Image (cartoon, rainbow, N blue to C red):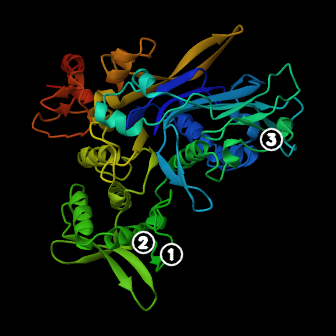
Amino acid sequence: MLTRLKVNGFKNLVDTDVRFGPFTCIAGANGVGKSNLFDAICFLSALSEKTLVEAARSVRDEEGHTTDIRSLFHRVGEQYDSEMSFEAEMIVPRAGIDDLGQEAKASMTFLKYHLVIAYKENGSKSSSNPLEIRKEELTHITFGEAGKHLLFPHSKEWRTSVVQGKRRTPFLIFTIEPEDRNSPGIYLFPDGRRGRMLRGDAMNLPRTVLSTVNTAESPTVLLAKREMQSWRLLQLEPSALRRADVFNGPDHIQTNGSHLAATMTRLADNEEDGNQIFGQIAVRLSELINDVREVSIDRDERRELLTVQVTGHDKTIYPAHALSDGTLRFLALAVLELDPEALGVLCLEEPENGIHPERIPAMLRLLQDIANDPTVPIGPDNPLRQVIINTHSPAVVAQVPDDSLLIAEAKEMLRSGQRFKRVVFSSLEDTWRTRSDNEADVVSRGTVLSYLDSVEKQGTETEFLFAGSTDPHTQHNGIPRRVIDREEIQEALSESGVLM
């Protein structure tokens, strides 16, 4: 779980500091840079298992093409920043499995990862590795300090279940000062042992040290790596969702939505009554479309293929290839909600695509239910899972809980006599970010109204339930307050004639 991310010098992320709860919605106009935050998260994830160059090339530009490595660095005019830095605070699972199948158990579960990457002064497009690591550190945050870092509403029982362990020393330290080209070495501190120096040419590391840890010798570093590997951008492609799966093939949904049928089969096979899983999926899907009698898997024994199918109330069977794109995406998310093995950070761009405006609340309920509930301890029924979405839809902005919303805006900044625009992520006043962090950016009422001025009046009878918030400032009768339900927003919309 990613609780805070600081980024500087990556694309138009300059002095960026974002705090995340279990569910976060980022709204912003096209081109403002809200997707760059997703790129930063995915870049860190790629760095946990790929070389520096491979991770950099995995970041796509706006057209979906491979990015020129130099263009990842922030630029003003023709001048690029010399380095980019990332600082991620994360909660990792207490236990996991290493590459040799051995169990690894973290000595601390609340961690801070700091990484600084520079573009070599003599680097070039043709260089095999134009990037170098200037700093890499993995340290811990104690249970006593956790309250100052976990600002979103949560119960003490939840915090006790996720912040565990004791530690006095860091887990990983590697620093090269720009003025000192003599590498001091890399210190990796195995859990419960004294630190040791890793030998080698630290000036030309092809990858992060964290990415090289594959065994339980350094279990906490390994589990930090596993956590970062689970940070994914879901780009659910209808062609992949419609594809049949082979028997005994991969059985976990991939980022493009493939292996949906196999995942559903695994979940059903793991239950005493597999029909219960299909029943839960059908109930959830019926929130999106009314004509759902049941959801099932067609098993073609001759060809050994598994295919998703939906049966309507008139008993007409609709195979996956006959379902709409929006229905398939919703179905995949409904399956992810029920999968206790689907962990980590799930990022989605514009989840409202293909969804009728009247059904957007159903999509948002599902996304919130996928995310971890911070009012109860983690467990199989409440996995450590996080959802971050971005959107430019007024309907989505209106319906999300007001303390889950961040507005991405391009703001002018002056540095060294040069003016440029950077993206800033602002929250609404009187939400957990602004009450707990005096330096949090606050979005203006006018900016919020610009999203909502086309939203027609919502009936007060609309029931839009979100689980997980215990904050009295953001609840009314136990239901988190939507953006459109805020008193000042209602008054402003009434004055403008939007609400009559």
Residue 428 position (above or below residue 120): above
Secondary structure under the numbered disc 1 in the rendered image: loop
- Few, some or many C-alpha atoms within 10 Å of disc 3 (few <14, some 14-19, many ≥20)? some
Of the two numbered discs 3 and 2 in the rendering, the one whose residue sits closer to the viewer: 3
Q: Amino acid at mark 3?
A: Leu
Q: Position of residue 233 (x, y in %)?
A: 51, 48
Q: Are marks 2 and 1 in contact (CB under 8 Å)?
A: yes
Q: Are marks 1 and 3 in contact (CB under 8 Å)?
A: no
Residue marked by disc 1: 249
Residue 393 visible in the snapshot: no
Position of the C terminus, as image quadrant, is top left
Total residue callouts = 3
Give the residue type at disc 1.
Gly
Give how far across and how far down residue 446 sits, in percent: 35, 17
Find disc 3 in the rendering and name its residue. Answer: 205
Which image quadrant is residue 341 in? bottom left
Q: Which residue is mark 2?
A: 262
Judge whether 236 appears above or below 426 on screen.
below
